[in-house]
Amino acid sequence: MSRMMAKSEPEEEFYVPNREQGPLLGEENGYTDSVYNHDESRARKDSAYAVLYVFYMLTALAGGFVGFLNKNANFFQISTLEYLQDANHCSPGRSLLAEDDSPDTSFLSSSHYWKSVVVYLVVSLAVSLVLGYVMLRLLVERAQTLVNAAFVINFVLMVFTAFALINTAPMASAVYLLLSGLSLLAYWMWRDQLQMVARLFAVSAAGLKSNPHLVTLVLGVKTLLLVATVPLFAGMASAYQNGQVVQYGAQKGDACFADDNVTQVPCCAWQPDGWVTPFLVFAGVGGLWTTKLAFEIRVFTISGAVAQWYFSPVGSSTRGTTLKAVRHALTSSFGTLCLGSLVLTAVEAARSISERARRQRDNIVMCLVACVLECVYQFIEFISQFATIMAAITGMSFCDSAREVTDLLKRNFLASYAVWWMPGFVLNSLIFTVSLAWASLAGLTYYVQVGNTNKYAEK
């Protein structure tokens, strides 16, 4: 891994690799195919965490199944606002809402809406595919131009916002002007790292071009994530339907009020059973863990496939690289990915807790604490992402990979920091600009079309 960073120094000669030319680091530089661990029988690592994940998810699904078997069959009738406003409905012995009193759901029909926008959705999907291909080609051939364009776009937007707010919010305008100046300073100070990022973009785009099934992989992972989480969330929804209608507000005449005797509230409320709330938290963590695991599998597989292509001998075939990386992800390194995703899940949960605390206690101290904690969270995510990449290449355990990455960062922190945040910044800026332009064009077209339709209708 340290050799991979060594070749990323900006002073080295760079060219975009392809199947005919071979990788950026070839045999002439001492880097061969042996960098990637091709062993089909890699030793299993962190297996205990794979067992823990499977047991956790089976327990969550079992809880959801119990909730489904015991749910209140009339939940959707007795939980409506109209039903809960009647104090008689939360009295003991009161019968449930009659079938003919079920709420009207005709508002869910949206056929008119879909007929009016379906053309725009289809065209937007087609345009997104075309723009994605164009972006890929530009990253291969004009990576440096795109990196420079991202900073220019960001600078122009901040200056435009500053002048737009100069009369209504002078302080905010000054902040945006300051940020625009800092962006120019960062561009000048990090110009060498920006060249490296442009090179990495070109290599990544060339790798994707040589491994087209990585796109299939990403779509497949997202589909499997949806399939895996639907039963879990269905079980959570069923569990919430275990409970009863209870008294909520204090009744005074025909209305009910809160404790302040001023605010009018529904007389009744739906109260889940005591086990439901802890189960929802438990299952929610399982859903978050599964989501993080899916993204870890994606990072691992893409890293493994690209590493095989990157370190392969000149002119060798890339056939089967994605499949081999998938096999490693779902077999020998599955426990490693479970541990990595568990770490990311814990970070996400801690971030949510600290953000909630900051909102509840809105003061300067909590803001400072939240900022410091956010830096810690992002650093842990940074190490975890690089550890996953290291595990994909070498087959090491998560902790061993994290130690190797930490040692690497001690020697190449500045370059690694640039690799961390600059690519995301560049891509997000370009995506935002293209999306804003297309959304504006589509919105304007739809507005003109609707306006013309209304004129014809009036005639």
Image: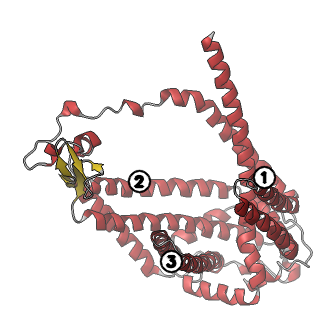
Tell me the amino acid under the disc marked 3.
Val
Q: Which residue lies furthest to the left in this view?
A: 93
* 43 horizontally vs 207: left or right: left
- Whichever of labels 1 and 3 marks the residue nearer the N terminus, that label is 1
C-alpha distance separating marks 1 and 2: 33 Å
C-alpha distance separating marks 2 and 3: 23 Å
Tell me the amino acid under the disc marked 2.
Val
Q: Which residue is drawn at 71% across and 67% down?
A: 306
* 187 horizontally vs 167: left or right: right
- Whichever of labels 2 and 3 marks the residue nearer the N terminus, that label is 2
The N terminus is located in which quarter? bottom right
Placement of 292 over or under 132, stated as above or below: below
* Relative image position of residue 97 (x, y in whole percent): 18, 38
* Relative image position of residue 413 (x, y in whole percent): 74, 84
Residue corresponding to mark 2:
230
Mark 1 touching mark 3, by CB under 8 A? no
The C terminus is located in which quarter? top right
How crowded is the residue under tag 2: few (<14 C-alpha within 10 Å), some, or many (20+)?
Answer: few
* 15 horizontally vs 197: left or right: right
* Relative image position of residue 55 (x, y in whole percent): 35, 72
Color encoding of the figure: secondary structure
Placement of 424 over or under 420, stated as above or below: above
Which element is circle 2 on? helix
Residue corresponding to mark 3:
343
- Whichever of labels 1 and 2 marks the residue nearer the N terminus, that label is 1
- Tell me the number on the disc at residue 122: none
- Tell me the number on the disc at residue 135: 1
Which element is circle 1 on? helix
* Relative image position of residue 295 (x, y in whole percent): 56, 65
